[in-house]
Image (cartoon, helix red, strand yellow):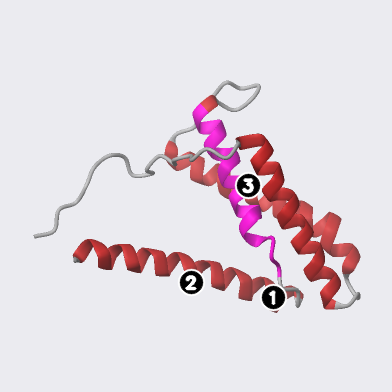
Amino acid sequence: MLARIVTGLSAGAAYALVAVGVVLIFKCTRVLSIAQGEIGAFGFFLALRWADRGIPGLEWHPAPVLTLVIAMVMGALVGALVERVVMRPLVGRPPLDALIATLGVALFLALLEKEMFGTATQFAPSPVGDWSVEIF
């Protein structure tokens, strides 16, 4: 029972975080960004790949906690690139144009992820290790 409560709270917290991100982007830009999730997922998949196979050119395998930092940085870089290249030219255009552009970015990133990382299930390492906490 307790495990279900914790799982439900963590899933709800994740959904709330996504909702806050969507609202924050909309309030700042007046654009409903459909690409937000794919931008984050692309950074995460890239960081998982680098943690597993090493960073190309450096042959360095980052620790699981550092993988999360790399994922955030890569997601931020992809987001900044999308803002500069795709969204900035659409300033002053009807909101539907920007919505369709973010849909295009989301589809592009989803297909790029499929080509780069495949469709097999990928598991992320636990950032806190293999320890567990027992309650009662």
Q: Earlier in the sequence, mark 1 or mark 3?
A: 1
Relative image position of residue 114 (x, y in whole percent): 65, 41
State yes or no: residue 47 in magenta.
Answer: yes
**Mark 1 vs mark 3: in front:** 3
Q: Distance between the Cα atoms at labels 1 and 3? A: 21 Å
Q: Distance between the Cα atoms at labels 3 and 2? A: 20 Å
Q: Which mark is residue 26?
A: 1
Q: Which mark is residue 16?
A: 2
- Whether tag 3 and tag 2 are in contact, CB under 8 A, the answer is no
Q: Nearer the viewer, residue 96 or 65?
A: 96
The residue that appears at 61% across and 36% down in the rendered structure is 117
Q: Identify the residue position indicated by label 3 in the image.
A: 42
Name the element at disc 3. helix
The residue that appears at 56% across and 33% down in the rendered structure is 49
Relative image position of residue 92 (x, y in whole percent): 91, 75
Q: Earlier in the sequence, mark 3 or mark 2?
A: 2
Name the element at disc 1. helix
Relative image position of residue 36 (x, y in whole percent): 65, 61
Q: Is residue 132 left or right of residue 104?
A: left
Q: Residues within 10 Å of mark 3 (few under 14, many from 20)?
A: many
Q: Earlier in the sequence, mark 1 or mark 2?
A: 2
